[in-house]
Image (cartoon, grey):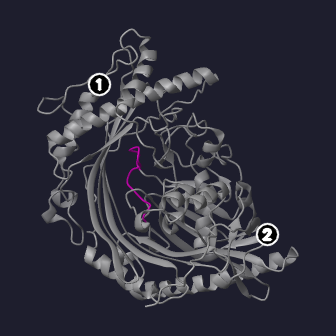
Amino acid sequence: MGAAMKPSVSRIPRILAAALGAFTAGALIAPGAAPAGPDRPDPSGKDAPKPPPRPPERDMSKTGKDPAKAPPGLGPPSKAVTNEILDAIAEEMTRAMTQLEIPGAPKPYHIAYKITEVDVNDCAASLGFTTSRRNRHFVNLEARVRVGSPQLDNGNFVVPGAEELNAVSTINMPLEATPRIARRSAWLVTDAAYKEGLIQLRAKLESRKTSGAKPDIPGWTTEKPVVSDEAVLVPPLESLDELEGRAKTLSAAFRDQPAIRESRVAVTSYLERRWYLTTEGTNIADTRRASGILIVASGQAEDGQLLHQYFLRYGHTAKDLPSEDELKGETKRLVGNIAALQKAPVMDHYSGPVLFEGEGAVGLIRSTLAPHLGGTPVPEGLNPQEAKTFGGALTDKVGLRVMSPNLSIGDDPTAKEGAGKALIGGYRIDDEGVAAQRVEVVKDGVLKTLLTSRTPSAKNQASNGHARRTAEGGAFHGSATNLFVTSKGGVARKALEQRLAGVAQGEGLKFGVVIRRFDDAAVTSAPEFARRELYALIKSTDQQLPPPTILAYKIYPSGKEELVRGVQLAEVPIRAWKDVLGTSKEITVYNFLASPESALQLRLTGGTDEGFVPSSGIESGIITPDLLFKELDLGGSAAGERPAPLLPKPGK
């Protein structure tokens, strides 16, 4: 979900004072008298309690702490976040646990720091000319504070009227930070997060008192600390010159194409180093590395409907991406698809068998199944409509058959490859400091467990290392990483298409429908709507539906295919997965960055910057065969219609 703006500095003391007034009954801190600044002295230049001992040093040639000894083909470790910086933050963490307190209010019982260093090279081009070329390199320090006790704390609660308060505070640190600067940064964010935690806890207690709710589920689980001093080294970034050359060459292919309204190519190379420190004793580093390419183009049908097509690929490095010739072929295919869509008929209502092929199967899983695989409870304080965005359709079905007996699902954040291709969704530990674990979610159609975080539920009392997606209320939610869908009895893709047509014919239908790609608002959105168009978009958008399809076909018994446009799939209930009639032998491996924002938010804001904001998406992968469903509903959609330009496209 999109993060809300934090309240102003002047607003925090007023809200805090009200909360503290309730905690202390006015004895020590009257409303309006709460301090605005940190309650402990500035740590700069002062002695501090010693942090827990670091893990024993290992041979530098193994840990990579000496850049000169980094293995061939791998880049050096961080120069911005050193052991001295980490030790300084750990010292401030120890001081906060022993000294951070407001009289009459609960003390922190858990503090966690995530230090993130992001280094990104990305370029974008249109029609052979560079539109963006930049390097971004920054370090961010995040503090999360829990107050109360593991049985009842401030977590997983949305404060009414102040949804942005979640006991999390962040600050950017200089790339040339000193231990003194690091301690001061930790001092500031810890203080801010603690005060938010007090507000959140008080509001949670009041809410439960008003509603009469008495949950007997703890607020936080106890997990074994993870400790490792071994650095994770990755290949260096591709250069800006290399990225720019590729973007310009590929984007030039869209010149002089009558069917194309707009087009762009964006390429990126990034790494993200993370360090985790907690008062439980977790002390570990992780590094994520990925390169990606996006090719996106749009056109317009005669009735005004906008037509989007895109090609998106990610890998660990550029070596995992398609070759130059393959990318040129994909560019030509996008042009051909848009030209064909301009002449294609709009889909009528249809109810019958639907086949999801390749990226179509990925899109279906991503939008209709993956959100329900998380086992973290919905945050308290949300209204029913907001709660729907958290899935939860499988919460009470553990041990029951929820799918075809031929289907199984596993999620594996430790996997680096799937079906011989690179996967970017992995990590060593999740965002709550729990070691990554492979989880068997569904076995032969039976739901075995869900993906969990440290916020327990009635059915899941422990984390299995899948805390990733931050939600309102400050909790991480169990989320998919590298999601493997496997099947028994798969057949060749063409044979599955023939079965689709046969099932449709048996139902008295003239054709079946195959879906090969869904829209992705993160990469196809453009902020060019007029005010009335924005209003119409908001009014017409049903966020419970899957994204619109952008490649769909009718398939007839003769084998003939007919391209159709404007196809909108109706809501796909979980029970529909029990009626998967068949799967393919062909396997699709697809990496993407899962946006924390909804499709509607992305449409309104214009999507991600040039198609890529690597530091804001969640690295994910889906591995799946094609999927044939017995019966689903879909219909025509006029979404995206707008007047065509009055004048023809300019000439050369």
**Mark closest to the chain's N terminus, 2 or 1:** 1
Please tell me whether mark 2 or mark 1 is closer to you in this view: 2
- Whether residue 52 is visible here, answered yes or no, is no
- The x, y position of residue 181, in whole percent, is 17, 41
Q: What stretch is highlighted in magenta?
A: 424-435
- The x, y position of residue 522, in whole percent, is 50, 63
Q: Determine which quarter of the picture holds residue 167.
A: top left
Which residue is farthest left? 45
Task: Give the Cα distance between marks 2 and 1.
Answer: 62 Å
- Residue at which label 1 appears: 100
Give the numbered dot on residue 349. 2
Q: Which of 88 and 218 is in front in this view?
A: 88
Q: Determine which quarter of the picture holds residue 586.
A: bottom right
Left or right: where 260 falls relative to 28 = right
Left or right: where 288 falls relative to 452 = left
Give the main secondary structure, helix, strand or loop, of the magenta stretch: loop
Q: Which amino acid does label 2 sit on?
A: His
Which residue is farthest top? 27
- Whether residue 309 is visible here, answered yes or no, is yes
Q: What element carries label 1?
A: loop
Q: How crowded is mark 2: few (under 14 residues within 10 Å), some or many (20 or more)?
A: few
Q: Nearer the viewer, residue 418 or 374?
A: 374
